[in-house]
Image: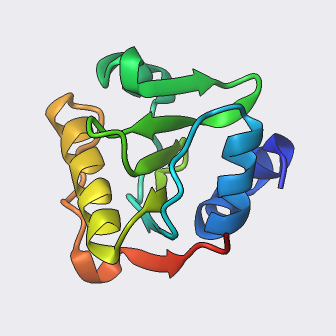
Amino acid sequence: MDPQDIREDPAGAATDVSALRKTVVEFEEDIADGLTGGYYDLGTDLNLNAIAIGMGLANIKYDPETFPAIVYHLDDGRPTVIIFEDGHLSVIDADSADAVQEAVTITAERMGELGLYQGDAPVEDDIAVTEIDA
């Protein structure tokens, strides 16, 4: 999977957590070694430029010319959430299913607080969790 593949099929990239993890490493972004990931569809398009600025550049890597999504590290440094323009969130490097669900919820809430996402809070049963192939 390369950045062009992600541009053409962000939903596919969000659900293919193992391949996405490898692409993020190729994007020269440090990630931890958690073996659990997941994804969730917010159901709306997002303004990635506004999100990158609003959520704090210290925890974000965003270079749309190189990689068409935001790489967002939660404050504790783990897990990492990949935010796609089409509203898909993909979680990599989590240690558990609970960590995946918490990362999705925290990310959606932060975007909501900034007025950048007006949808409902994620429902735990709708957050897909998967094991990442190491």
Residue at image position (46%, 30%) is 47
* Residue at the spot 62% in from the left edge and 62% down from the top edge: 11
Vertically, is 114 above or below 19? above
Quadrant in the picture for residue 65: top right
User: Could you say where residue 4 lies in the image, as x and y percent from the top left?
Assistant: 85, 43
The percent position of residue 30, horizontal first and vertical second, equals: 58, 36
Decide which of 88, 58 is in the foreground and name it: 58
Residue at x 14% of width, y 34% of height? 113
Q: Given the current orientation, which residue lies at the most extreme front position?
A: 33
Which corner quadrant holds the C terminus? bottom right
Q: Point out residue 98 in the picture as x, y percentages from the top left corner.
A: 26, 72
Q: Is residue 55 left or right of residue 34?
A: left
Q: Identify the residue at the far bottom of this view.
A: 125
Nearest the viewer among 66 and 94 is 94
Q: Is residue 103 above or below residue 118?
A: below
Which color scheme is applied? rainbow
Quadrant (top left/top right/bottom left/bottom right) for the N terminus: bottom right
Which quadrant of the structure image shows residue 105? bottom left
Q: Position of residue 127 (x, y in %)?
A: 36, 74
Q: Is residue 62 above or below residue 122?
A: above
